[in-house]
Image (spheres, rainbow, N blue to C red):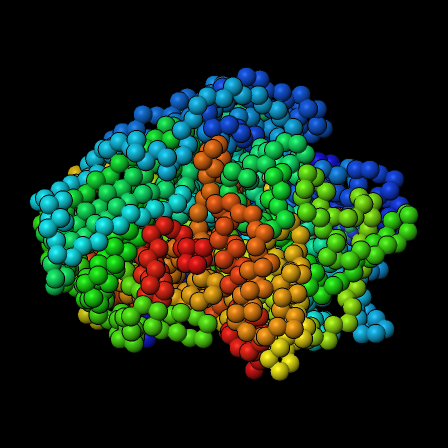
Amino acid sequence: MKPFAYVKPADVAGAVRAVSDEPGAKFLGGGTNLVDLMREGVERPDTVVDVTGLPLDTVDQLPGGGLRIGAMVRNSSLAADERVRARYPMLSQAILAGASAQLRNMATVGGNLLQRTRCPYFYDPAAACNKREPGGGCDALGGFNRSHAVLGVSGSCIAAHPSDMCVALAALDAVIEVESVRGTRRIPMTGFHRLPGDTPEIETELAPDELVTAVELPPAPFAARSRYRKVRDRASYAFALVSVAAALEVRDGAVTAARLALGGLAAKPWRAHEAERILLGGPASEESFARAAEAELAGADVRPGNAFKVHLARATIVATLRELNTGKGTA
Amino acid sequence: MTTKYAETEPRQDAVKHVGRPVDRVDGRAKTTGEARYAAEHRYPGMAHAALVHATVARGRIEAVDTEAARAVPGVIEVLTHENAPAMKPAPKTSLMNLSSLASGTTVSYLATDEVHWNGQPVAVVVAETPETARHAASLVRVAYRELPAVVDFAAEEPNASPQKSSVLQPAGGDKGDAVAALAAAPVSVDLRFTTPPEHHNAMEPHATIAVWDGDRLTVHEGTQNIAWLRAHLAQRFGIPERAVRVLSPYVGGGFGGKGFVWAGTLLAVLAARATARPVRLALTREGVYRTVGGRTPTVQRVALGADGDGDLTALIHTSVAMTARIGGMPEGVVSSSRHLYDAATIHLRQRLVRLDLLANTAMRAPGDSVGSFALESAMDELACELGIDPIELRRRNEPERNPMDGKRFTHRMLREAYEVGAERFGWRERDPRPGSMRDGRWLVGMGVATAYHPSLTMPADVTVRLAADGAVVVRCALQEIGVGAATVQAQITADELGVPLEAVRVEIGDSELPAGPGAGGSAQTAGAAAGVLDACRKLKESALALARRAPDSPLRGRRLDDLEARDGGLYHGGRGETYAAILARAGRDHLEAGGGTGMLKFLAKTLNERRRWVKAASGAHFCEVRVDRDTGEVRVSRWLGMFDVGRVINAKTAAGQLRGGIVMGIGMALTEATQVDPRTGRIMNPSLSEYHVPVHADIPRIDVHWLDEPDPTMPLGLLGIGEVGITGVAAAVANAVRHATGKRVLDLPITLDKLL
Amino acid sequence: MRVNGAAESLDVEPWVSLLDALRDRLGVTGPKKGCDQGACGACTVLADGVRINACLALAVQYDGKEITTIEGLATGDDLHPLQAAFIRHDGLQCGYCTPGQICSAVAMLAEHRAGMPSAVTERSGELDEAEIRERMSGNLCRCGAYNGIVDAIKDVAGQEAR
Ligand SMILES: Cc1cc2nc3c(=O)[nH]c(=O)nc-3n(C[C@H](O)[C@H](O)[C@H](O)COP(=O)(O)OP(=O)(O)OC[C@H]3O[C@@H](n4cnc5c(N)ncnc54)[C@H](O)[C@@H]3O)c2cc1C
Ligand code: SF4
Ligand code: FES
Ligand code: FES
C-alpha cells in the first residue's frame, strides 16, 4: 500500500474541506473496498479522510413516510432496521444477500454506493484496463467475462457494478444527498452511476470532492410486498451473477404498481423502466412477466463468457415476479 | 456422531484407545490461539520479504529498475538476477533419493534473466516491515523481451504426447481389443469430459522464516514433508543436511500444496543469506497462486460397451493432462479404470502436453479425483442407457480380482459399501425417471459414485521413551496438517504399551526428531504406525528382559507374545507387573526403543507387494442435490459416504478427514476452477473471493460411515483416509444433477450456466 | 486501543492493518491471515463486540476500541464454551481457520439474540442449521470441518437457551 496521510474529521464541514484541499484525497468508510484496492495498488490516494467519525450514522423518519439513511450507517444496521424490514423488505434482503456478516458490520452505506467493480483485470495491475488506466485497452473483452455486464456496455469497458444494496435503492427511487465545499445537492439513485461510454474511469455523477451524506427513501407503500433475489455461484458469500429487486402490486389480476431493478448486468444498478412499462396495467401472468423481461433484455450485448446472463436474467425476473404474485416459491 | 464407534461405547474395564472418538491432543492449542504457525515466530532483527512476479509467460528480462523501490525508507535490499547470490540447481530426480523429487520446479530463481511462466518471481524486496516490502515490490519495474509461449491447454490437446510409465505408475495398458469390443457392443456410451485446473487453497498461505547462523540454517515453514524440505535446502544451499533445521509443528492445511519446495521457501532462505538477517517471507494469497502449482486440467474420454444385461464388454479411458516445461507431476488420471470394473476388454492411455506455465503438482488424490469423475459419470450414463439402476450396474461388474492383471485384492468391500449405504441413504425412494422428483421450485436428484484410492505406506523412524514416572514420549518428525497426527499415534502407543492416553506425549514437526514419512499419498498414519508398533514392541521386549533378570518377577520365564500390555505394565492373566516396578527394581529411570524400516528394505518390500496385490481404500458416495428449476442453481442437500478404509484409529478425526474430502469434492463439482488466461498464461482469479471454495452454506450434513474391517497387509489394518473421500464426489454430484434435470454435464465445474 | 482487556498503546503508520498490528506488532497471533482481502474470515476479531475482518481494517480507525481476539475468550484455564465445543465436536482440523470461526460464532450468537436477521430468515427465528450456516458463511474452512463447527455452535446455542 502506498504510504498516505490519515485524517479523521469530526464533522461534515471538516471532511469536505479535507478533500477539497487535497486532489489526491479519498474518503474512507468501512474500508472493505478501498483498503483492498489500495493494497492491490489499484487505488493510490495521498490522503485518506476517514468519515466514520461523522455524525451521519442514524436512520431517521421523514415527514410523509420516507426514511433518511445516514451515509455512515453500517450495512448490517440498515438491514436490521425494523422500518426498513417492514416497509422496504427488498432493501434489507439485498444487503443481507451481500458479502458476509463481518463485512456488512464494517461497510457503510456511502461506501457501498461507491464500491468498484470486481472485474479481475481491473484488479490486476499487469492487465490492460481502461478503467484503471484510461486508454490502456480492456483485457476483459476477449478474456474471462463471465461476471461481466451485458446491458449498457461499451467497447471500452464491460464491467458490472457489484453492489446488491444499490439494486434495491434503484428500484425504490432513492435519492442521494451529497455535500462539498460548494454546498449540498441531491442526485436520484437511477442517475447516480454512469454507464462506461468512452470514460469508464468515471463511474458516478459524484465529483471527487463530494461526500455522500445521506440516502433518502421516498414513501413506497407497494414496496412492503417486495423481494430481492440473488443468483450466484455459491450459496452465500459470492457476488451476484444476476439479481432482481422487484415489487409488485396486483388488483383483480392486473398489475397496478411494479418496480424492477437488475444487478450484475450493467455498470450501474439497472432500473428496468421498459419492463415496468409493459407490466403496468397488464395481466399478472407468466406470459406478461416474460414479455417484460425480454423487452428489457432485448438490447443485451453479450460475449461468449456472459451470454448465459440473458437467459438467467429472464428466468430470474419471471421467477421473482411469479413469487411476488403468488406468494409462493420461496424456501 | 454417526460413526460406528459412537454407537457402541467401549467396555469400561479394558479401554482401548484405538477406534475411539478421542479429542485431538492439540485441540486446546488450536482453539485458544496458542498454536503458532510458521509466520508467527519472531526473531530480533527479523526483516520481511515480498516478491515481484513476472507479467509475461515466457521471455528474457531486459532491464530491472529497482531505484524507486530502493528509495523507499526501510528497504534493506532488492534482489534480482543481477545481484542475488547463486543457489545450486535443482537435483536430478532419482528413486534412490526420494527427496530429489521435492523440487516444485527446476528453475534456478534469480540466477538468470529467463522467465518461464507468468507469475515467476523475478525480484525479492527485503525491508524492515512487511508493508514496506510489499509497497516497494510494487515499485520495481521490469522490462521483458517476450518469447512465444505455449499456455493454452485446450488448444494444445492435439499436440499431446504419450506419458511414460514409471515403476510406481503405469501410464496405460490393454486387455484384449477394447476398440473392437466397443464397436460390437449392443449398448455403449462414448463421452468426452473436461476438468479445469484447481488450487489447494489451504487456509494458511505458505510462509517461511529463514534464519542463518553461520552455515547453519533454521527454517520455520508449514510443510507436508519435513525430511524432503531439509534435504532439498541442504542441497540447494550447499550445506550438510545436519546443518538444516526445519520446524513445522502446525501446518495450516496442505492438500498437496505444501508437499514440495516452491519459490517462496528458496527465496526466503536466499534473502536471509544475502542480507544476513532473519527473513520472513509470507506469501500473499495471490503469491500462492503465482508460485505454488495446482491441479492439472484434464481432457478425458471414457467409452463403455456392454451387453444387454449390463456386463461390460469394453472400457476405454484416455486422458490428456499437463506438466510444465519447468517441471510438474504427471498424474495417473485413468488409474481407477485399472481397478474398478470387470470389463472383458480394457484400453487405457495417458498423454501429456508441456506448457509454459507454473508446474502442476499433487492435489488431494491426484489422478483419481479427476479420473473418477469421468469414469463414474460414464458408468452412470451407461446405466441410464441400459435402464438399469446404477448400483446394480456396478454390482454386476464388480471384479473378483484386479481387472487389468488378475492380481488379488487385499481387501475389497465395495458390494457391502453399496448395500449398507443404499439402505441408510434411502436409495429405494429414488424414482429413476429424470426430473421426476420435485420439492417446490427445486428439482431433486440422487446420484451415486464409487470412491477409490490406492493405499501406500512410507517408512518412518520412531523412538518411544518410557520414564519411571510413567510418562511416555513418542518422537517422530510427522507433519500435522489437520489429520490429528499426534493424536492417533498417541492412541496407538497407549494401546500398545497399555498405558493411559494422557501419559503419552507425541513430539512431531521438527527435523531434529527421527525422520517421519511425508504427509502425502494418505500414507503418513500407516507409515508412522508401523514405526510406533515396532518401537513399542522393542520397548516391551527390553522391559521384559529387565524383568526376567529378577528372580522374583512374576514375568520370569514369559515371552512377550504371551503377555498383555495393560494398566501400565505387562501381564499374563492376573499376574504381571508395571513398568514402574520393573524400572525401579532395575534402578533405571527410563527405557527407550527405536522402530522403523530402512528405505531400501522398505522399497523392496513395497515393490514385492505390488507384484502380488492390489490394495486400496474405497467407498460408495450417495448424494442428493436440488436444482432450481428457473435458475439452474445446484445445492447439495444430503450426503452419505460408506467407506471401506480398513481399521479406523480415531473415529472423530477419521470422520473429519472423510468429510473434508467430500467437501473439497463438492467444491470441485460445483464451483472450483483456476482461470488461466489462454492469451497470457496468467491466473486471473488468484483470490478467495473469485476462486470459489465451498462456504458453510454450500455444505449439508454429511453422514460418513465405515465398514471397519482391518486390511490384513497394512500396519494395524488401516488403509489411509486422507484422499479417498474426494474421489468419486464430483461424479456423484454430476449423476445426481443428471437425475434431477436429465442433463449430463461433462465439464467441471457444474455451474448454473451449464444447466440453463 | 484495548486488546483482550489490556490497554495497548501502539504507534503504527496509517497503512498498517489492524490484523498486522495485532500479529506483527503486538504478537497477538491468534487472528490469522488467510487472504488479506476480506474473503475468508480467518482474521475475524471483535471490535466492541462486533465481528469484523481485521485485514481490511486500518489499525488507526480502531483507536480507542476494545478488541477481542481468540486469546481473550477463555477465562484463565476455563475455555469459552465455544472453544470447548469446537474440541468436543471436532470442529477443526488444521486449526488455521479456527480462531476466526470461534470469534465469529461468539458474535453470531449475540447478533442472533439481538434479533439480527439473515438472508435465510425473513424474521430471525430459531437458530437451526440453515441459519447457522448462512450466518457463518463469512468463515471459510478449507479442511471442510463445517459439520463439526455447526454442531459445536448448535450445542452452545442449546446450552444458552436452557
Ligand atoms: C470478499 C468480499 C465480498 C463482497 N461481497 C459483496 C456482495 O456480495 N455484494 C455486495 O453488494 N458487496 C459485496 N462486497 C462489497 C462490500 O459491500 C463493499 O466493499 C462495501 O459496501 C463498501 O463499503 P465501505 O464502507 O467499506 O467502503 P470503503 O471501502 O470505505 O469505500 C469504498 C469507496 O467509497 C468511497 N466512499 C466511502 N464513503 C463515502 C462517502 N460517504 N462519500 C463519498 N465516497 C465515499 C471511498 O472513497 C471508496 O472509493 C464484498 C466485499 C468483499 C471484500
Ligand atoms: S471490463 Fe472495464 S474494468 Fe474490466 S478490464 Fe475492461 S475496462 Fe477494465
Ligand atoms: S484474512 Fe481477513 S478475511 Fe481473509
Ligand atoms: S481447520 Fe483447516 S481450514 Fe478450517
From this viewpoint, is residue B206 visible?
no
The quarter holding residue A186 reads bottom right
Q: Residue at x 49, y 46 (%)?
A: A305
Report the side of B147 relative to B142 (left or right).
Answer: left
In this rendered view, identify the residue nearer to me: B14 or B132.
B132
Q: Position of residue A204 (x, y in %)?
A: 74, 48
Q: Position of residue B325 (x, y in %)?
A: 37, 28
Quadrant observed for ligand 2 in the rendered image: top right
The quarter holding residue B705 reads bottom left
Whether residue B309 is situated above or below residue B549 in the rendered picture: below
Q: Residue at x 84, y 38 (%)?
A: A22
The quarter holding residue B1 reads bottom left
In this rendered view, identify the residue nearer to me: A281 or C120.
A281
Whether residue A52 is situated above or below residue B129 in the rendered picture: below
Q: Residue at x 63, y 22 (%)?
A: B66
Report the side of B15 relative to A321 (left or right).
Answer: left
Q: Position of residue B334 (x, y in %)?
A: 24, 45
